Image (cartoon, rainbow, N blue to C red):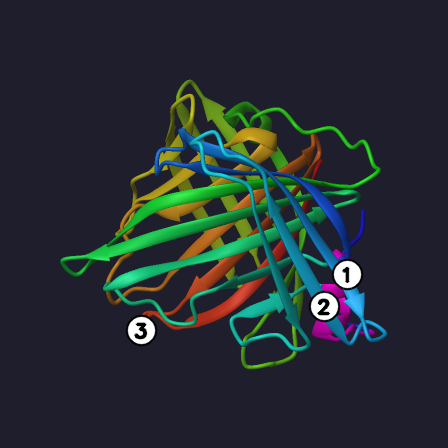
Amino acid sequence: MTHPSPSPGLSQWQCLLKNLGAWEGSFTRLSPAGAEVSSVPTVVTLEGLNQNQTIRQTLEFGESTAGDPPTTKVLEYSSLNRSTLFFETGAFSQGSLQFSPFGDFGAEFGLIAGNRRMRLVELFHGENGESRLSSLTLIRETLRGSSAAERPPLTAEQLVGTWHGRAVTLYPDWRSPETYSTTLSVSLDGTQLQQHLAAPGLSLSTTGSVTPTAIHFTQGSTPLQLLLLPDGASANTPLLVPKGQPFFLEAGWLISPTQRQRMIRRYDAQGGWESLTLVEEEKA
């Protein structure tokens, strides 16, 4: 199992280069409850130019299930913006630097395992001073020429057990990364899921109600929904972004029965982007 590490340390650009190649897959738009709205076949190609000093990104969209015609978009860039951070595995997140209850807000998460990528976009829409989860896009990709199989949809039962993790937290102000161990214990009693998370300076227990498509955590001041998605993916978000309180957006990916990755993008009480954490977990 490969772990990200802040030492000896790759530059952010070198971490981006872990994504080079032609990624074939699909963009599937989902409702806030996780139901499929539309899907489109895609090829996303990242190629290095000028000795990898520049990246050319070509997005090829086929005809969607909603009847949209094929399109192609080409982007070239030689630097990264402040809203994006990469880990040494090539995993990344890009998104809003600042939350506002007016207008759109959200983030993309990208996780890599071997020849496969799982990306998830979580979007919120602000109206009348409230920002609600409006849509998600699940992006499942395989490197061209490889034959890695897609995972089945995630279930609550697959999460049961004790997960030992290694976490790396990056900061948008370029502070030194932090690396630490985590333990997540999950049990299921009928439709009630209990989980306990332990990390340095943190001990947190929560209980959620399980449905076939989601786990709902209604304790505390911010109700959360963990959607159980195709390909072992999950989206853990508030349905309504709280005002004046810290909150987080999370994407998870069960890449084997005993291996899972989670990425957490945290915002502070003022709505400013605070940190990005990648946790790579193994079930005991």
Q: Answer with the quarter of the image where residue 41 lies.
A: top right
User: Callout 3, which amino acid?
Assistant: Gln
Query: Residue 208: x, y in percent?
Result: 38, 34
Name, please, the residue furthest toward the left. Answer: 128
In the image, residue 222 above or below residue 170: above
Within 10 Å of disc 1 (Cα), the crowding (few <14, some 14-19, many 20+) is some
The CA span between labels 3 and 2 is 34 Å
Residue 160 in view of the camera: no
Residue identified by numbered label 2: 55
Residue identified by numbered label 3: 270
Give the secondary structure at mark 3.
Answer: loop
Query: Residue 239: x, y in percent?
Result: 30, 45
User: Callout 2, which amino acid?
Assistant: Ile
Residue numbers of the magenta segment: 8-19
* Contact check, label 1 and label 2, Cβ < 8 Å: yes
**Residue 13 sits inside the magenta stretch:** yes
Which residue lies at the image location 77% right of the left edge and 61% below the top edge?
47
User: Is residue 63 rendered to the left or right of residue 100?
Assistant: right
In the image, residue 234 above or below residue 173: above
Which residue lies at the image location 43% right of the left edge and 71% below the top edge?
97
Q: Earlier in the sequence, mark 3 or mark 2?
A: 2
The numbered dot on residue 65 is none
Residue identified by numbered label 1: 47
Q: Earlier in the sequence, mark 1 or mark 2?
A: 1
User: Callout 1, which amino acid?
Assistant: Glu
Q: Earlier in the sequence, mark 3 or mark 1?
A: 1
User: Is residue 2 rendered to the left or right of residue 16?
Assistant: right
Please tell me which residue lies in front, 160 or 211.
211
Query: Residue 212: x, y in percent?
Result: 42, 21
Give the secondary structure at mark 2.
Answer: strand
Query: Residue 159: x, y in percent?
Result: 57, 31
